[in-house]
Image (cartoon, rainbow, N blue to C red):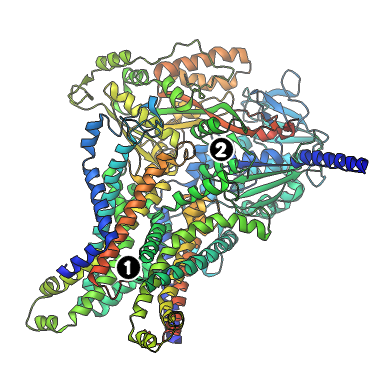
Amino acid sequence: MLRLLAGRLAQAAATLAILSFATFLLIGLMPGDPIDLAIAGDPRLGAEDAARLRALHGLDRPLVARYLAWAGGALEGQFGFSRLYAKPVAEVLADALVASLALLLPATILSAVIGVTLGVLAARRPRSGLDYAVNFVAFAGVSLPSFWLGILLIILFAVTLGWLPAGGPPDEPTLASWLRHLALPMVTLTVLGLAAYARQARAAMLEALADPWIRTAYAKGAPERAVVLRHAFPNAAVPVITVAALDFATLVSGALVTEAVFAWPGMGKTIYDAILGNDYNLALLALLLSAAVTLAASLVADLAQMAIDPRVRT
Amino acid sequence: MKGALAAGLLAAGIAAGTAHAQQRDTLTIGITQFPSTFHPSIETMAAKSYILGLARRPVTTYDADWQLTCMLCVRLPTIENGDAVPETAPNGNPGIRVTYRLREDAAWGDGTPVTADDIVFAWEAGREPLTGMGPAELYRSLHRIEVIDPRTLTLYFDKLTFAYNAINDLNPLPARLERPIWREDARAYRTRTLYDRETANPGLWNGPYRIAATQAGASVTLERNPAWKGPAPAFRRIVVRTIENTTALEAALLAGQIDMIAGELGLSLDQALALEKRAATRFRFHFQPGLVYEHIDLNLDMPALADLRVRRALLAAIDRRQIVERLFEGRQPVARSFVNPLDWMADDTIPATGFDPALARRLLDEAGWAPGPDGIRRNAAGERLSFELMTTAGNRSRELVQQVLQGMWRQVGVEIRIRNEPPRVFFGETVSRRRFQGMALFAWISSPENVPRTILHSTEIPTEARNWSGQNYTGFQNAEMDHLIEAIPLELDREKRRPMWRRVQEIYMAELPVLPLFFRSDAHIWPRWLEGVRPTGHLAPSTLWVEQWRVAQ
Amino acid sequence: MSGRAWRRFLGHHAAVASVLLLGLIAAAALAAPLIAAALGHDPFTPDLFNRYAPPSPGHPLGTDELGRDLLLRLLYGARVSLAVGLVAALVSAVIGTCVGLAAAWFGGAVDALLMRLADGLLALPSLPLLIVLAAVDPARLGLPRGAMWFDLARIVAIIAVFGWVKVARLARASALSILRRDYARAAVALGASGGRVLWRHVAPNLAAHVTVASTQTVGAVILLESVLSFLGLGIQPPTPSWGNMLAGAQELVFAAPMAAVWPGLMIFATVVATNFIGDGLADALDPRAELRSA
């Protein structure tokens, strides 16, 4: 077990190191110095201003030198200053991460609960009308463009009915305000996410229910609910947990479209702004953080798998 | 019994009435950007300028009538009233010394008065290149400051132009708070300034409001500044919310989450016009034409475009009036040249090339471009008359205009290939290094009576040797224009400048290095109960006069 | 597919309906120039007098923000979106299959390296990296900038970077299980070359599974293209694609919702259809062990 953990940690470190260099390179290939953009926007800035600002931000050194400078600082825990937010990068990301978690944890839990329930219900009656309906709902969820759904929800609940705000972070640090502002983005993410859970749960349940052990239990007269919950369900839990862990990790950076539509200041939106704003320090740390979360999530998923199902050991 | 009931109802009525009036003590404004820093002199950004307009005042500024006016000074120093005296600068050039007297009641939010020392500190910090404040030219030409008393100071400039008394960009900074930070390490000042570390510090703000709280990327909350001695602003609290997606911004307005949308940073004109049709009873819409000059730069290095007849034909072939009518409901004035019709020196008696497709075809025939088999013209060598038209991707209005122009030019046999890039590429590389193959559609933002040195002077053509500085992307070279550009700033008498400006416009409209399109209008959206907002149409935001905004009775 | 598999597929009503739907969309997309000629206009010329017009005989679905026929733009957009979807899925499938087969055949260090690479890619946050890749300036790498074919090629390439992984794992697992069987080992012992074994024995079995995975990829690619266009990084106007039609219509979604509803609906219908087809195929090929998406 320890050897597994050590191995995975070493792998993770290597992946992150390679990723950091690759990303630095890619961002360097992106066009448009932030300084050039500033010059274009301000008629009073001239050539000397440009040269001065470039030197000030260290943008006149070659790419590799800049990367090594960053890497050196990073190993000491200094991740630099965000050009876009005028704050240390770590501070910006801490806020963004909290905002993301506040949105994603409830959304993931809701998706999982609703999705699994639907999947289990469908598995009990394969090929029935219910099965098709659940399939369709699941597919619909995964086929909707997220910004389309988001805007539709805004039109319905915020503009027409006026029940909920159209977006943005909570106005006051009260629970009520948080819930009101979280509601619509959470519903969007839940609808989009429950498909994966429904399908996984349905597939796993079907396989578990086909097990001869289960048929024996039925033959012995056990009630259906008991069979499903106590015997089939734990077997179905394994792939669901895997999906949940990976899904959550993906959402950390991948919910950016939803965050953009609802003006929710989470990790996804921060990454996007940083990448397109040529904010090297912020983009790098944000990407590394998301990758780290994904790696951690997959490790958690594997460990959970091994814990629940002793037959699965790598 | 009845009496008590009546009294009770009356009291309730009064309470409700008062509550209604008190309900309007917070104003929520929606904008589409969030500032990357709150320091007044580091990095130019429209969002920062808008928010800071509520919380700090510059010494001088251009007002809504495009006149220079005093904000922190008592009166504008001029040569006529003796506060400004021309003299010879140490470098031998004609210079000027200008004396400003600061208002008695100007004070920072912690009670400290705004003094000459605050301007001296700003100047010291700005002169040091490591600090990162701009524009460099201002701090360079201001070579000496003499403090006469805590409220009076004389600025010595080493050049003399007609804008000698406009120090709009020289922002006073609270020396007591900021100087120790700057002295410790000028290079790190940018990351340590209280403006970003402790934005809610009252000592940083000298306007009617002070910033009380910020939520990065999302909102800024401002409260009344107790140290403000000017007219009391109507709202106890102002919240500025950033929603980048304009559809979501519109939804927030309709849902009541925000009260108004700032025109300087709000909905596109298309969106605002559509919204006006649906919500005119709830909101008031004001379309303010501004100093944003939408135009098409022509790369004069291309042989086809080097021919003046071709350029005139291109302009004659497009019906700009129809575009403005159809796409913008006539709310954006067609541009004759880069000079805005609201600027005092605009001269509309100069003959201009209007919509005349017959003229366009004739000019192209004369220039040697004969219609080809597929409708596109060819010259004697068989080359097609085809250009690339580039603009910033994601800007709906510009993309629409592009596609309409493509259709109009096709009618006279010119082929247009549309190619768009994100603004960073477009401005950062393609335009700034003159790599565009034909036409570049974008906007210039300027100030009242802005001399077009960087865009029209022949020494401002970006080249590799000069590190790509300069904004004369067309490559325009005209000796008379160069001479006028150099002479106009030095002429202090406005009436003497008038014929010089007329000549500039004549040359521009005759030579057509650029195809003028129109001036962009900002769409301001206010609730019916708000009055007193006066947009300026130029870079100074309407928030600089927030103490005049009122709840309608 | 065997006869039994066909029958099972045909019994899957939703999948069959989806095949018909996709066929209809594809046919309409191919026939777009004919429809354009029949209606008498093209999807590219703006008509400023006719913006956001309601449906009429000349414009069956009305017009868009520049007066262009909405139906024609949907059909031409279908060409682009379907082409990107199919080509990207195909390229991913080809690369993935090659990688998976190589890993299975050579085993050992090659296998370990390739699978590590696959795991590494899965660990990365895909959407931000796709954005980074889409925002890269090709001119800095010496590639041409701006041509439409290049835009499409670029999107396909970017998607393939992440898309091959799922297929590779599938291919590897499938190939390994077949290569372990007796007839395959016999063939190798008799001197058959690697290529021959792979082609005659592995590939036929593989094809079915890869097809299923690829069908689902088509839907995901179409959605991804719409996200990239929404962010301004996908197909550039005036070339219509469903994604950029949605992005263009969002500003005026309150005033003229249909310009946004139609492309959204097309994306939705196509993706749902591909998902159902994939599901039907999976069910038809192996009804007991439902293929789990990796």
Frontmost residue, C109 versus B78: C109
- Chain letter behind tag 1: A
The image quadrant that residue B258 belongs to is: top right
Could you give the CA–CA distance between mark 1 and mark 2, rounded to whole angstroms?
52 Å
Q: Which chain carries label 2?
A: B
Check the image and report above or below for C36 versus B341. below
Rendered view: C233 above or below C182: above
Question: How would you rate the neighbour count of disc 2 (Cα within 10 Å): few for under 14, some for 14-19, many for 20 or more?
Answer: many
The image quadrant where one finds the C terminus of chain C is bottom left
- In depth, the one of A38 and B210 nearer the eye is B210
Q: Residue at x 72, y 35 (%)?
A: B145
Please tell me whether mark 2 sits on a helix, a strand or a loop.
loop
Q: Where is residue B396 in the image (x, y as percent from the top left)?
A: 44, 36
Q: Is residue A70 left or right of residue B123?
A: left
Q: Residue at x 25, y 55 (%)?
A: C19
Q: Which amino acid does label 2 sit on?
A: Gly
Q: Mark 1 points at which residue?
A: A127
Do dots 1 and 2 share one subunit?
no
Image coords of residue B282 (percent x, y): 62, 33
Residue B32 position in % (x across, y down):
56, 42
Q: In which quarter of the image is residue B143?
A: top right
Tag 2 residue: B266
Given this view, does label 1 or label 2 mark the residue nearer the observer?
1
